[in-house]
Structure formats: C-alpha cells, structure tokens
Amino acid sequence: MRLARRCQRIAARLPLGGRGRISCRTLEGSMVSQYQVIGNSAPRVEGIDKVTGKALYTADFSPPGTIWGKALHSPYAHARILSIDTTAAKALPGVHAVITGRDVAGGMYGRAIKDIPVLALDRVRFFGERIAAVAADDEDIAQRALDLIEIEYEELPAVFDPLEALEPSAPVLHDGASAYQGMKLPEGAPPNAYSVIKVDRGDIEAGFAEADVIVENTYHLPRVHQVYLEPQSVLIWLDGERVQVWTCSKAPYNTREALATAAQIPEESVVFNPTLIGGDFGGKATPSDLPICYFLARASGRPVRMILDYTEELMAANPRHEVVVQLKSGVKHDGTLTARQVRFLVNSGAYAGYKPAGIIRGSNQAAGPYKIANTRLEGINVYTNTVPGGHMRAPGEPQAFFAVECHTDEVAKAIGMDPLQFRLLTLVEEGEETAFGEVLQDVLAKQTLMAAAEAAGYYSPKAPNVGRGIGIGDRPPGGGQGTADVTLRPDGTVLLTTGVFEQGSGTYTTFRQVISEELQIDPERVEIEVQNTDYVKMDSGLGGSRGTRIYTTAAYDAAQAAKTELIGLASRQLEWPEDKIAYAGDEVRRTDTGESVRWADLLARSGDTVSGRGHIQDSARPHFTSFTAQIAEVSVDPETGEVKLLSFTTAHDVGKIINPISHQGQINGGVMQGIGYALMEELRVEDGRVTTLSLGDYKVPTIRDIPPMKTVLVQSESGVGPYQIKGIGETPIGPVAPAIANAVADAIGVRVRDLPVTAEKVFQALKEAKA
C-alpha cells in the first residue's frame, strides 16, 4: 500500500492536463472499475492442468504406430550438393523412410515469401540447413541412419555480413528469387537485397543545412533466440484423405496454408488439432519441420513425430534478426530536431520465409516518437549465408528502439542538454505528426515518460559510477481476424468455442472473464472449447498484440448475439413481446410486468441451446498507440567493466485492463527478456556457424538477475473494442536495452553501441577512452 500511496502523490504533481491518470499496479487490488469480473485478477483457466501435468503438448500425443523423424543438417554455410548416397541408411534395421530434396522437389514454403525448400536440393545456403531426413522406430535409430548418409559437397564462397552482402562482388544466394511466390524484388537493388522500403518526408538536405550540430552513429544488434521451454515439435498422421497435425503453432491457419503449399495438397485436407504451446515469444508461427514431417509420414505410411533438440533450435530455427542501424540527426542548440536519416539494415539470413511480411516491422520505428519535419528512411532486408531470422516478441522494435534511444541521448549530449528535458521538448504530442507523418490520437508520450521519471527518482542524488538511463517507445495493437461462439446450455453453463491455440498469454482466461462479465454469471460456469482448423475458414492466431483487439471483441460480440437469440426464444415460448424482454443474469425478465424466468429452465423446457457468434476482421492500422517509458539505474565497476542493474522502472500508457495479474506478468516477462537482450544474450555466429549451441553457452537471465522493479500505469482514454483495451504483450521489451545502455553511459561517460553490453565491451570502451 505504501507504493500505491506514492503513486497517488506522483499523480497529483504531474502536469497531465486532464488527459491521463496515473495509477500503480499492486497485486492487492485493481483500479476502480464499473465491472464485476473484468479488472479483477483471475487464475489461468489452464493453470491447474499445467502444474499438475495434465496439460497436453505436442509431445504428449502419440497415435498407434508413431515413429520418430530427424533431419540431417548441413556442415557448410554455402555449398553445392554434388551427390547424396542414402543406401546404408535405408538398409539399417528399424528405418522406415529416408528422403532427400529429390523426393520432395518443387515444394517451397514460407509465410509471405515462399523461398524455403523442404530439403535442400542442389545447394545449401546456411550452416544447419536440412538436407535429408529419416523416419525410424526411435530417435537413436534415426540418428544412426543420418550418420550413414554420405554427401559430397563443393564448398562455395559465402557472405555473412549484411553490409558486405550488398556489395556488387558478393556471392548471390538466390539467383531465381523473382520466381518465388510472394516475392516482389525492388527495382535496381543489389541482388541479395530482396526487400527495400524508402520514405522521404520534407526536405532532408535543407533540414541538415538548418542544423547547428549533426550527430551520426551506427548501432549493431545481434541475433537472439526466443528460448521457449518447449522446442519446436510436430506430429503428423495421414488419416485417409486427411492430414492430421499436432504442432506448437500459435497461428495454425497460416501454418496450415504453408504446409499445404509445400506438400502441394489441398489446404482443406489439412487439420491442425489443438494443443497447448510451451512458450512462443513470436517464434512459433512458422512451419519449421512440418513439411519434412509430412513427407516422412507419406513415405513411411506411419504417424511421424519430430522434436528439435536445443542444439538444433539454436543452430537452425528462426531467431530475432541481426540488424545494423545507421542514424544521422540534425539539431539546433535549442533542442529542435531539424532532420533525421535512418538506414535500417536487416540480416535476414539465408531465407525470408520465416517472416509474415517481406520486411520486419521496426524500421518505421527507427526515427522514434519525435517531432522531426525532415526525415528519410531506407529499410533493407538482405540475404546472407546465416541462420534465417524470424519473429520474436515485438519484431524489429527492440533493434529500432535501442538505436534511436541511444542516439537520442547522444544528440542531447552534443548540445549539452539533459536527456530527459530533450525528450520532453521533442516528443510528439496530440495533433502533431510523427517523424514519418502519422497523426495519432490520445498521445501520452510525455505523460508516460514523466511518470517513469518521477517514480524512478530520476533527479535524485547518485553515488559515483552510478547512472540512470531512459528508453521510450510505442506500439499499436495488431490486426487480423478471429471468431468466437457462445452457447447457453440447459444446465446453466456456457460454452465459449474458439480456434485460438493458447501460447501462454492468458487468452482463455480473458475469454472466460469477458463472457462471465457480459452474461453476469460466475466465471466457473464458463467452459472453453478449442476447435481444430475445420472450425472456420480463417483465423489469424495470436501474436502482434492482436489478442486484445480481435479476440476480446469477438467474445464480447458472441455474448451479445447469444443474449439476442435467448430473448427471441423467450418471446416465442412465453409469448412475451420481444421489445419488453431484458437479459438479467440467470434470468430473462419482462420489463413491463417484472415477471422473470431462469434461462436454464427455459432451455431445459425446449430441450435446446442458444448460440451467438462474434467474428472480427480488422487489419487497418489504428490511429492510437501504447507508449512505454523505462528508466534503468546501474552501477559500473570501472576496474572490470562489470554492470550491475540496481533498479528498473517501467511506465505504461494503458487502456482498460482485463486481468491485472496477467497484465503485470506480461510486463515482468517483457522486461526480463529485455534485460537479457541488453546484458547477456547473443546467438554468436562465426564464419556462418552458430557457436552458442547449448543453453550452457547461450546465457539468459534468471530470477537472480532481475532487479527491484516498479510499474506505473498511465490510464489512457482510448483503446480498442467495447472495453477500450490496449495491448501489453510486446510493449515492455522494446525500450529496456537502450535504458540500460544509456545508464551505463551516464555512469562512466563512455558508450557501447552494440549489444549485449558486456563487461568486456565496457572495459574496452573505458580503455579506449583513456588512451
């Protein structure tokens, strides 16, 4: 309660102009609400099953006759395949099928761009690419069979650095890229640059000419892995004319399409069956080994299971992209930003198909939420002979925020202005255009930043070698389409039917709270039923913070439709005027006479149920966003370069919060991942070869690495859907790394511009500063 009272005192002092309300998250209670269920913390629907071992994941399904599949990975980053001999592997007892690229030729897959072969046919393009696969009685036999496959290679020149890949002399990875489905090659771009976006606003040359100071910096962001607990896994069974699939995909309808394309079979013949997902963080909307597993099942005539081990995960899955960001800003001595030029270079790795779009989101965030009249953006996705990048929580945004927020501190330093004051001077406000010309509604950037600064004690005294740093960013909720059905049953229970495969974000619990609220019943009376992909024609799946925008609204609409159907049934059965009937919790009530009947009795009498459907299809970019401002406090040992994170404050511009404990969990998890990105995580690649091939080598934060943390909420007046909700799944991770890097620079006066900020890099920066 002391923390809550402190937040109230902060709120009273902040100049919010009546457009935002500061509140504090505690687990003792939630914000004042007119709702009975929404806004109160609720336990996970699937929580008991998870902690008692009853929850079913992909590895728990095993139709009779299931055998194991494994893939053989390339030992070269770039090589021509001259010959493959599988004779010995096929002769090994217990082996049911051996396949190569020749057996699956023609099938290509991917999300937006279909450039990934099921198995490499005549060339491998990255270390770890799948070349052949085996189905056998067990995993050991499958591995022994892979070891017996003999392949002759001709090693080819390779390119690993995205800047070098743009050079005219660089080896070309995809000679026939223009033929790939979904590919739109940019005219005049270098051969390895498969996606380029350019934005010019204002007069960039005049803007730089107007500046008193010009600051240029380059930032390097490494690959990092999602590190979900459950590795990529799939089980496929050819059941007559249907292809039955169990896999840990959060976007089963999209993945179904990719599998059908690769296998060259009708999409409607493929059925994705519901299973829980053991963590995702953006990495489990890709087909992964599904096409290989399908062809093994077809060749063997048996159900086939494939589960990556973590060496395979780190070597050949779809990590967050490596990005190089080049920033150049012009600024006046009074703090006015006159121009900003951004080059956002994305190392896509050997293939583009793991992304749902040609270029990852984030490049359009690299100018920051600032007022700049003259801007230029060049975003480039480039092929290299490295592990293909995919999506990870807030794809592209942590890279963009790190660069622009570190650069913002460097610009402020160049004109001798305090970093907080510089941001408050230049952050966009209501009615103003962003750096790329967008006008947003209900803009609470400054309010959110000031809330973080007050809570963190930004201007309070500091000990020597202690620094504080700021990071700020924003993200609108994603769009898509989703469906929910609500059925009222004669026993008084309610069934919510969905096609959403839960990946750990608490969506099922949100469904239950919405239905309980709208039908005015106990949450325990709401049952969740998850359907396979025969349920509807299309569902976008979770990701992109669309759960709040799409699925909550679909559930709400389904509840309203079910109530309408119930009132119609009551009118017919009871011969009451339909316009005189109101839904009232467990009853339907006649408004003119006060008569009422329990709707369960009404349904029991008819021997029927009533149902309502909600379907939402909305992909338009909303004209509002959610701001996150974060402040890190660190100490740095000048003798060793060791960085210790002392405290962390995170402030969020939020709408209505459905489930406070889940909301806080998303914040905590996002901050924790951001700390890993800032201080320790890196999927290291040397000459195209991933060298961090175990979780012993690849370091992630544990609970002991998490400092004391404060969460401050700035209550917004806008959001999506009937409850005015804003997304929270992705916003907490983005500004963490720049806040920490800026704090390190504040503590010791030197800057590290590439992540992670390790003791070795800090020590070297100090050494160079003294030289």
Image: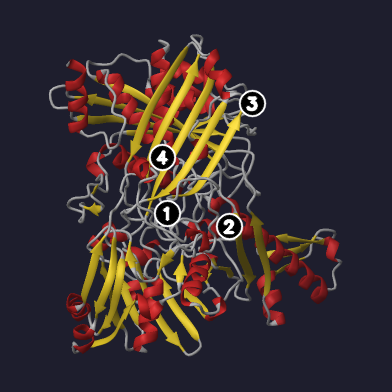
Which residue is under mark 2?
551
Residue 385 drawn above or below residue 613:
above
Which residue is under mark 3?
432
Quadrant of the image occupied by residue 741: top left
Q: Nearest the camera: 163 or 250? A: 163
Find out whether the residues at labels 3 and 4 contact each other: C-beta distance under 8 Å.
no
Q: Earlier in the sequence, mark 4 or mark 1?
A: 1
Within-10-Å neighbours for mark 3: few <14, some 14–19, many 20+: some
The secondary structure type at the circle numbered 3 is: loop
Q: Earlier in the sequence, mark 3 or mark 4?
A: 4
Q: Using residue 542 as the reference point, say whether residue 440 is left or right of it.
A: right
The quadrant in which the C terminus is found is top left
Gap in angstroms between the C-alphas marked 3 and 4: 24 Å
Quadrant of the image occupied by residue 74: bottom left
Q: Position of residue 3 (x, y in %)?
A: 40, 30
Q: Earlier in the sequence, mark 1 or mark 2?
A: 1
Q: Earlier in the sequence, mark 3 or mark 2?
A: 3
Mark closer to the observer (2, 4): 4
Which residue is under mark 1?
282
Q: Position of residue 336 (x, y in %)?
A: 54, 15
User: Residue reaching furthest front?
Assistant: 169
Find out whether the residues at labels 4 and 1 contact each other: C-beta distance under 8 Å.
no
Q: Nearest the camera: 83 or 745? A: 83
Q: Is residue 520 visible?
A: no
The secondary structure type at the circle numbered 2 is: helix
Find out whether the residues at labels 1 and 2 contact each other: C-beta distance under 8 Å.
no
Which residue is under mark 4?
398
**Residue, x 41% and y 25% (percent of image)?**
407
